[in-house]
Image (spheres, grey):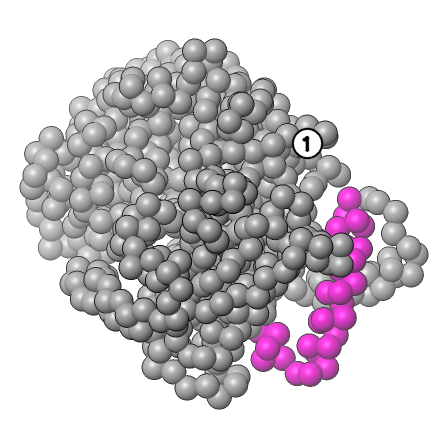
Amino acid sequence: METTFPRLLLQHAQQRPHAPALREKEYGIWQTWDWSKVARDVRHLACGLAALGLQQGQNLALVGGNRPFLYMGFLAAQSLRAVPVPMYQDAVASEMGYVVADSDVHIVFAEDQEQVDKLLEIRESNPNVQHIVYDDPRGMRGYDQPCLLSVRELMALGERWNQEHPGVYDQWVREGQPDDVSVILYTSGTTGKPKGVCQTHRSFSSAAEGGVKVDGLSGSDNVISYLPPAWVGDHLFSIAQWLVAGFTINCPESSETVQIDLQEIGPTYYFAPPRVFEGLLTSVSIRMEDASGLKRWLYNRSMELARRCGADIMDGRSVAFLDRIQYALGNVLIYGPLRNVMGFSRIRVAYTAGAAIGPELFKFYRSIGINLKQLYGQTETCAYVCLQQNGRVKLNTVGEAAPGIELKIADNGEVLVKGVSVLKEYYKRPDATAEVINADGWFLTGDAGVIDHDGQLRIIDRAKDVGKLNNGAMFAPNYIENKLKFFPQIKEAVCFGHNRDEVTAFINIDYEAVGNWAEKRNLPYGGYVDLAGKPPVLEMIAECVTQINRDLAGEEGMEDMQVRRFLVLHKELDPDDDELTRTRKVRRNFVAEKYAVLIDALHGGKHEQFIETLVKFEDGRTGSVSATLKILEAKTFPAAARKAA
């Protein structure tokens, strides 16, 4: 698109000044900003930042949750032709310090006292941080550092500056170019230090425009913004598509109230990574265990019908008349109330991305009338490569090339992308840029995939993670792990098998789901370590692995990837222990090195293995947790089982 985000903001403010643009729930009450108020506040924020010394080409770091002034801070920086650099709010000070130093930041926008404390710690070793602007004043009364400034003070400063420099702000906005860098998003750092991905106004607005056209989004739609603002997915949905389509974004009161706020808002358009949909289904499963026998029978009977014909009804396919009647009754008694409990009563379209979603999980949501679809992309492509079109949704693909995107598969199976959403460069890293964009202009996604006869892309795994078993068969760990994580009892899984004779797995139980399961069976336990080692729990997880092996035996080319041996880990994999990224992706190499003794035990034929592991607590202390882990044999199936499955 030949425009910038600040110009899109002014366009909405001129054409529909009193339409709702932003809502925030505070103290239990929804506060609304219309487009004219957003435009005014962005003007004052931008002029305030200019008064503090922020100039064209400089970077403004932002850290916090989904708050109106944080989103407006993006636009304020862009209005000056400066560049916003969001950071994850749950990152520790050292992780933030790396981004602040790498992006040459002098001014940081922080949400609250927690973030201010981390930034003051960073400032001790990085005096280049001259100003810290905070949004939430709670707990800040005793802070008297001269570098601190509240949002209200910044806006008052900006209002005065704007009056003293009439017309300057409007000139900045007019001079902005579509090919200016609009944001620097830092990668999760699964393989080394995070890199700053430079995306332009053109790339993100073009990606947003493509999605808006495919799904018919408009100013009447409502979105709840609750995912980390530093994540590319939130930037696409809560910034880019917000400004292109002009819909309303709603900021929840807190991360703990998202489900309640979701029910109050009733969004028409929704986006979440698979783990959120997995969590919702886990909650439903737990609630159904508490239900009466009659309700459980009715639920199971209705879900059996939904799995058989629900998705076909949604896609407009032919369904038997009696099934349609029964489904309509199920919609009144089960599916509708279930959607309402989840906050999806008004959902017109929902997307998931960020990781592969299990086909059964995907089918569950579509079967109860939620138009859940997948999109595929990376930070380097504005989360925009493939979209699933209505009526052409396949459970095992991520859709076809989105408008403005070309796809092809390299000789080694890697997915290559060219088009409107590809990054401009990595910040200050021409070497890294050259590694991911080849001489012909194709971006190397790092994912292995195939394109089927309908032009739909199926992602198998990360290209670097796809390996081979010793018998020459393919080993795609992420493919197996996603199947395992469909079960509500399994929160995380890590598989091993490259250059080995067989596939093995680490499994993390879902403490809430398994704890509820244990309580229903009067099985006492004294915490995560104790629960994870209980023989009945191990038997239950073994049944899950058996089901996955049966499924793999029925998939052509996947028979050899059945899990032969597994163990249940004594602790949850945790970002604070460097085992997961902040977006909860497994740091596979780190986990393999940290738990090498367990991998050796799995492949060495042992039946149990003692391990002691260092852990970090939320208050910064360190400790250790130890256990003797049982190693279990999994039931496997011959390839012929495919015919009977």
Compared with 445, 189 (above or below) is: below
**Dot 1 amino acid type:** Asp
Answer left or right for 249 relative to 301: left
Residue 30 visible here: no
In the image, what residue occupies the spot 38% across and 83% down? 525
* For residue 187, above or below residue 293: above
Left or right of residue 170, residue 486 in this image:
right
**Nearest to the observer: residue 230 or residue 507:** 507
Q: Which residues, given as a range, are shown in magenta?
A: 287-315
Please name the predominant secondary structure of the magenta segment in the image. helix
Picture residue at 87% right of the left edge, 60% below the top: 323
The image quarter in which residue 486 lies: bottom right
Return the residue nearer the eye: 22 or 585. 585
- Which residue is label 1 attached to? 452
Counting from the top left corner in percent of width and height, residue 205 is at 50, 24
Q: Position of residue 271 (x, y in %)?
A: 54, 45
Q: What secondary structure is found at the residue carrying circle 1? A: loop
Does the segment drawn in magenta span residue 485? no
